[in-house]
Amino acid sequence: MGLFTLPQARSELERLRPVLDEMIAVRADLVELSAALTPGGEPTDLGGLPERKAAEARLNELMTEVQQTGAELKGVAPLLVDFPADLDGIPVLLCWLEGDPDLSWYHRADLGFAGRRRLPATAG
């Protein structure tokens, strides 16, 4: 997949919002089901092993859906999605972290999350 422009990445993020929201819900169910299945775990109304396996399968489907866009899913708890881009001739990843209202952060491709910065007002 190629590079995203900032408008393309923002549009793709909006399109992915329902997928990302479902990932958050399925992730929470999966954690609760897994805890209930451990020895001495608290029972849950969500079900048991079959429901946990179904939640795992659904989470994998949703992760694949995100990655098929060309975005990079870097984390699931919390969700972290990077969109490969170019900012003033420098390879960057436009970076969305669960809870961010919009796509307004980036980091150089060679630095990773620790190098995360706000996009300049002139970007886009």
Image (tube, helix red, strand yellow):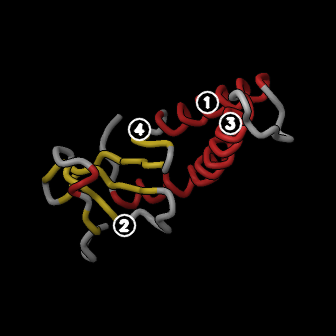
In the rendered view, does 34 fall on the left or right side of 4?
right
Which residue is painted at 28% across and 58% down in the image?
A: 106
SS assignment at label 1:
helix
Left or right, residue 92 beside residue 15: left
Label 2: which residue?
104
Q: Return the residue nearer the eye: 49 or 94.
A: 49
Q: CA distance from mark 2 to mark 1?
A: 27 Å
Q: Which residue is mark 3?
A: 35
Specify the quadrant that holds the N terminus. top left
Q: Is residue 124 visible?
A: yes
Q: CA distance from mark 3 to mark 1?
A: 22 Å
Q: Quadrant of residue 27?
A: top right
Question: Tag 3: residue type?
Answer: Ala
For this orientation, the residue located farthest to the right is: 45
Badge 2 marks a residue whose secondary structure is loop
Q: Is residue 3 toward the left or the right of residue 71 in the image?
A: left
> Could you tell me which residue is drawn at 76 percent across and 23 percent down?
49
Circle nearer the N terminus (3, 1): 3
